[in-house]
Amino acid sequence: MIPVILSGGSGTRLWPLSRRHYPKQFLPLVSSFTMVQETILRLEGIDGLKAPIAVCNEDHRFMMAEQLMEIGTTPAAIILEPMGRNTAPAVAMAAITAESEDDILLILPADHVIGNLPAFHKAIAEAKILAEQGFLVTFGVVPTEPETGYGYIKRDNIEHGLAYGVASFVEKPDLETANSYFQSGAYYWNSGMFAFKAGSFLSELEKFNPTMLASCQQALNNAKVDMDFIRLDKDIFSSCPADSIDYAVMEKTDKAVVIPLDASWNDVGSWSALWDVTDKDVFGNAISGDVFTVDTKNSFIHAQSKLVAVIGVQDLIVVETDDALMISTKDRVQEVKEIVAQLKEQGRCEADVHRKVYRPWGHYDLVDSGERHQTKRIIVKPGAKLSLQKHHHRAEHWVVVKGTALITKGSEKLLISENESTYIPLGVVHCLENPGVIPLEIVEVQSGSYLGEDDIVRFDDQYGRV
């Protein structure tokens, strides 16, 4: 069985923590591990697992690789999508990449929480048996309430071991309909998790959407292998039909079965959902960071960079980051995505990136900015190297605060230690490298007429960004 980790979402409903370039699946929301890491770690103890296949946006490739490496996981492949095309093409790509058509794929979105691991493992074991028989298995979460935020799967009365045949997939209902689903006992929340043989899925996809399969095969045939990554051909993949597994295959096949899953599942799709799965104090508050409260109940309060004080409220969501503050009542957190939409309309960077921006070589923190200047704190990992580059509109001053920097400046090579500095004039080709064994920390002061990140001309880059 091959775990297939789907990591294509942007998690806008968890803004301001989750952003387009650093979405929720790469954040440690419910433990010290990120959600991607939790997705892999909760499989420990299952026999016969092969190396996972990860599918993610190409902008997230280094985060995916690094987070898997941190937990000692070497993926069989990391497939990079140049743009999102929903889950069906992502799964098709993984199925084509698998070594054998008889390999069973365990499809796992990278942003779920599962509290009851024994129940989850039991469901996977049953799914493997059914998948070996040619069934396309989905996991239907046993509902705990009439939820209007999820799609549902209706089962029929034909039993297949612990599973049932699938009667239909239904869209997110209104509250009255959700109540009827909940009372009937024949409906499950659609978890987006599946198990099937690679060949079984590809055969059904070819039957119901041959154009999608052909596009995926062509995009992979023309893909480029870049370090640990498979870069899909952008022009070909952009023409691939966009569709979910449900619409493309599962609603049409006669081989679909659903396993009821009662394992404390949560897709952490909103701040209220995150409050549900987070440890709370005696007043029902889920608190993280430097927070003080008085007469506050049943609230979620997250402080990232400042002291946050909350007085006399209940059922409130307060999320503070170093560049944004979001406050909402728990019953209106779905509207966070409307704030993100407004930010995008106005071209605000807060929709996409944090003040701290991660790069494959490390990260930088924008400390201060003005009309013709900005200051960054830059951390370069041991052995890492920024691209060989130049700028048309800005000059840079570098001061080494910690570690040792190997600097290329035109035809010069400089080795600069703590409390030493250098100046990079506008237009000069330069490069920054950490040759040491401890993180390199520098303060960079930029000055010039334009200070945007797109004023970078790369000549050479070990991370393939030229």
Image: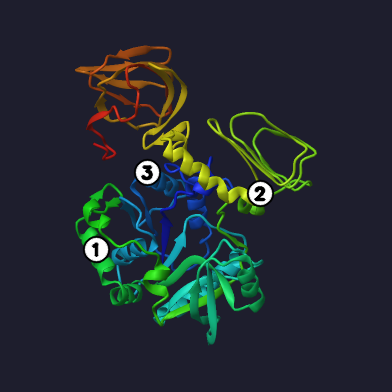
Residue at mark 1: 215
Looking at the image, can residue 237 be seen?
Answer: yes
The residue type indicated by label 3 comes to Phe
Q: Position of residue 99 (x, y in %)?
A: 30, 67
Give the image quarter of residue 313.
Answer: top right
Tell which of 209 and 278 is nearer to you.
209
Quick one: label 3 or label 1, which is nearer the N terminus? 3
Rate crowding at label 1 as few (under 14), some (14 to 19) or many (20 or more) other CA atoms within 10 Å. some
Number of marks drawn: 3
Q: Nearer the viewer, residue 415 or 126?
A: 126
Earlier-in-chain disc, 3 versus 2: 3
The foreground one among 299 and 261 is 299
Q: Is residue 406 above or below residue 310?
A: above
Q: Is residue 282 left or right of residue 25?
A: right
Cα distance between the residues tagged 3 and 2:
34 Å
Q: Residues within 10 Å of mark 3 (few under 14, many from 20)?
A: some
Quarter containing the N terminus: bottom left
Distance Cα–Cα, label 3 vs label 1 = 26 Å
Q: Is residue 11 left or right of residue 79?
A: right
Q: Secondary structure at mark 2?
A: helix
Q: Circle 2 is placed at which residue position?
A: 330
Q: Nearer the viewer, residue 211 or 337?
A: 337
